Image (cartoon, rainbow, N blue to C red):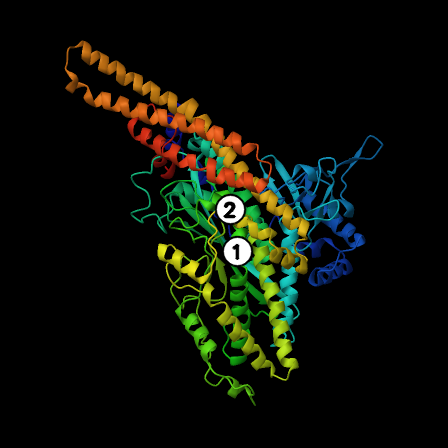
Amino acid sequence: MSSLRFKAAEAAVSRSLDYVGKVESLKATSIYSKNVFTIAKMNDYLSKNTYKELLQLIESGSQISRDIADHIAQAMKVWALENGASHYTHWFQPLTGTTAEKHDAFFEPDGNGNAIEKFTGDSLAQQEPDASSFPNGGIRNTFEARGYTAWDPSSPAFIFETVAGKTLCIPTVFVSYTGESLDYKTPLLKATAAIDKAAIDVVQYFDRSVSKVTASLGIEQEYFLVDLSLFNARPDLQMTGRTLFGHISAKGQQLEDHYFGAIPERVLAYMVDLENESLKLGIPLKTRHNEVAPSQFECAPMFEEINLAIDHNQLLMNVMEQVAVRHNFKVLLHEKPYSGVNGSGKHNNWSLITNTGVNLLSPGKTPKNNLMFLTFFVNTIKAVFDNAELLRASIASHSNDHRLGANEAPPAIISIFLGSQLDEILEEVESARVAKKVKNEANLWHGIPKIPQLKMDNTDRNRTSPFAFTGNKFEFRAVGSSANSASPMTVLNAIVAAQLIEFKTEVDKQIKKGTKKDLALLNVVRKYIKDSKAIRFEGNGYSDEWAVEAEARGLANNKTTPKALDVYVKEGSLALFEKLGVYSRRESEARHEILLENFYKKIQIEARVIEDVVTSQIAPACFQYQNQLIENVKGLKEMGLDGAAYSSQLNLVERISKHTNLILEQVEAMRQARKTANVIEDVREKAISYDEVVKPYFDDIRYHVNKLEKIVDDKKWPLPKLRELLFLR
């Protein structure tokens, strides 16, 4: 009873709720953005002229001069020091999938034996971390280490607070010495600028007063909590983020009693603490609830401008980890940490908002406004249809492969759910006849349905759709819970921007030939509705029948990451990104290589963990129990009892021997397969080998380990079981 597993279980059971009483739900309006250097705070620290000029530069997206940067740096330093910060850092998002930071002190010797607190415009605008030590896909060599982080003024600086101190964090991009992007933020900003320009050009058919279109995003974050002691007793959870072994718990989610259920008090204390810390950082968390699986939860913020929303989500994941530790929890953001229950996603709710306050994906009350809605609505559908494989690739990862299509997440087949009402409207628009020449708007709209004002819940929601319309936004449900949303949102912004550019070209051609503007718009919209029809699906995306139908429709079904990623380096994708200035060809190729390396390295780590745990923990526990049974049989024989008295024990010995031998044989075969894969030089072929040759051993080994878990004496089993991990105490 003194094993690490039982010590961990005892610690989890005896957790004191003392922290519950120490957590107080603070008034949101009193702490919101407390640790953020907001525009309003800048006004208190900058001169009137500098503040006014800064606002103009931010609004126009123009480059901030070094002189202005010096003023802002001075103001930022004063504010940060007043609030207890001792260091500053450029906070960036390298292609590791996590955030990165290098801290420098507000400290500099003055040459006279004293020191001053110093922070200049140069320090604010640019730093130089080691570029070669981050994933770069061959863009930088080890001897070409220089890379730069550069300030992103559109995302405010903030103070990150821990028990060890406070640090001023400055959101930045990360680029190589020669200018290639080495992060997630840079291409996102480029794609966001591209859709802004493309959308303005189209929206001015309807409203010439619009001068800016902003992509808006709301990110729903799902996660699991597990007791920290139990987490530390599971090497697989520690090393890979998921359980590589474990028999399905007798009780899981089948009673459907966890979803939206009463939040356990210990968890609620964590949530309140998380919300307090997030609100201080300007993260507008609004929603919290139990999710479907035991010990699974969700939090969701208000909608924000897309760059800020993604920065906030990356920061939120950091805060979740930090707060969890002081509650003796570990946050699991892996898409599928446990077998037999739902995995976790990060639903990205995307829309387009004009500077006049109009949601371009919200149906209007007049024919003109509805034509504008149809224009952006149908162009988005067409963009997804033409670039479905790119969207699939944007959410591809080893961890998300475990979740997609696993009965709680969308399948790898990208399709769009619109709901019966909008689907019918598109059918009517497609089939309605309109004269080639019209005298007025009334004639144009004769026989074409006027779209009613839609409520967000005008139709049932389709939980099986990867990309669904939900009233006034599209919800990309296939994004994984651990992902950086910049990847799928860069692709989505880029493909919709490219589609809007194509749309404007076609409309202008018709107008030039003498077709009235509204009719030209409607003609192209109708054409796109027809062309993209195959992507629309209202049924069950989980069904086998849909996979067959999707193939007949010509829709791709790229089930695994290595092959899904191929589209990044196809000529059409390379040309699309290059034309919009989002990725150069070299950047696209580098990202393809980085993602493939990340994929096979994660499987490589899992294989090593499996080998280690099986040989050093599971097999010895099985041998120990087997020997105990053998001694028992020997004792019964010595007593003179016949075989019937110990046949059950012999049967157990035989079963343990069979499964133990099989897992050890499979582990050795897996090790040899890994050695073979490791010598493959081509990164794509290596990733495929790990996926198709090494990874299949995991399920076989897990099957036999799980059988042993059901046989071996519970006191001797070394790993906390799923029933212990899933049900928080």
**Number of numbered discs on residues:** 2
Q: Residue at x 67, y 36 (%)?
A: 133
In the image, taking residue 397 as reference, residue 67 lies left or right, namely: right
Query: Do labels 1 and 2 touch, CB within 8 Å?
Result: no
> Front-most of 697 and 6?
697
Badge 1 marks a residue whose secondary structure is: helix
Q: Position of residue 230 (x, y in %)?
A: 42, 32
Can you give x and y, in whole percent of width and height, for residue 234 in the image? Answer: 43, 31
Q: Which residue is mark 2?
A: 561
Vertical relation: 571 (above or below) 334? below
Q: Earlier in the sequence, mark 1 or mark 2?
A: 1
Tag 1: amino acid: Glu
Disc marking residue 389: 1
Mark seen at residue 212: none
- Residue type at tag 2: Thr
Secondary element at tag 2:
helix
Q: Is residue 543 visible?
A: no
Q: Position of residue 469 (x, y in %)?
A: 46, 64
Looking at the picture, tell me which residue is in the foreground, 350 or 109: 350
Q: Residues within 10 Å of mark 2 (few under 14, many from 20)?
A: many
Farthest residue to the bottom: give it: 439
